[in-house]
Image: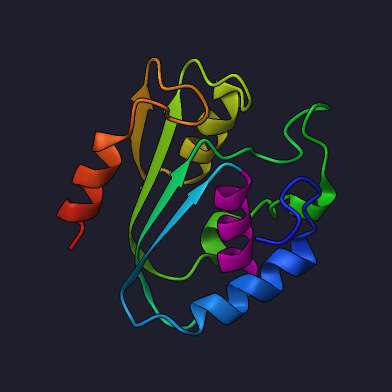
Amino acid sequence: MPVPENPNYAQWKDILKEELSNLDDNSILIGHSLGGSVLLKYLSEENCEPSISSLFIMGAPYWGLDEDWPSKEFQLSDDFASRLPEISQIHLYQSRNDEIVPFVHFECYAYKLPHAKTKILENSGHLFQQDLPELVYDIKSSK
């Protein structure tokens, strides 16, 4: 994504629109951190073609939750969950010891997306340094 150290939603949105238009129906999308929150924002605000079968979100910040995460640019609408396209499976992953995104952000997503399958990891940090076999298993199981 363009300028990851100083991201701009409009630029990321343009890239997503272009990339998503090249996918087949029933695609699987995976987003980590800012990428996960941007995917949720894009999918809840834009007409998305093709259809998405599964969405995997890992360690995503919930923008606007508190003063440490104030960015209106990346903030989701209050009703974002009801505005998402039909997605058969949504999976949320978070490590309790994430040093970047506090665990409460995961709890907000889990509350807003009650149908999502959630996985809480104990010691994977923000970058899931010890791999994420749970993600691999869930992707294989979603097909």
Can residue 33 be found in the magenta stretch? no
Q: Residue at x 81, y 54 (%)?
A: 73
The region drawn magenta spans: 34-45
Q: Nearer the viewer, residue 35 or 69?
A: 35
**Is residue 32 shown to the viewer in this render?**
yes
Depth check: 41 or 7 in front? 7
39 falls in the magenta region: yes
Instruction: From this view, report whether residue 58 is shown above or below residue 89.
Output: above
The C terminus - image quarter: bottom left
Q: Is residue 44 left or right of residue 142?
A: right
Q: Residue at x 50, y 15 (%)?
A: 97
Q: Give the percent coordinates (x, y) of residue 120.
A: 37, 25
Seen in the picture, residue 66 relative to 116 is either above or below; the reply is: above
The image shows residue 76 at horizontal and vertical percentages of 69, 52
Locate residue 126, reporting x and y percent.
52, 28
Front-most of 45 and 93? 93
> Does residue 133 appear to the left or right of 18 in the view shown?
left
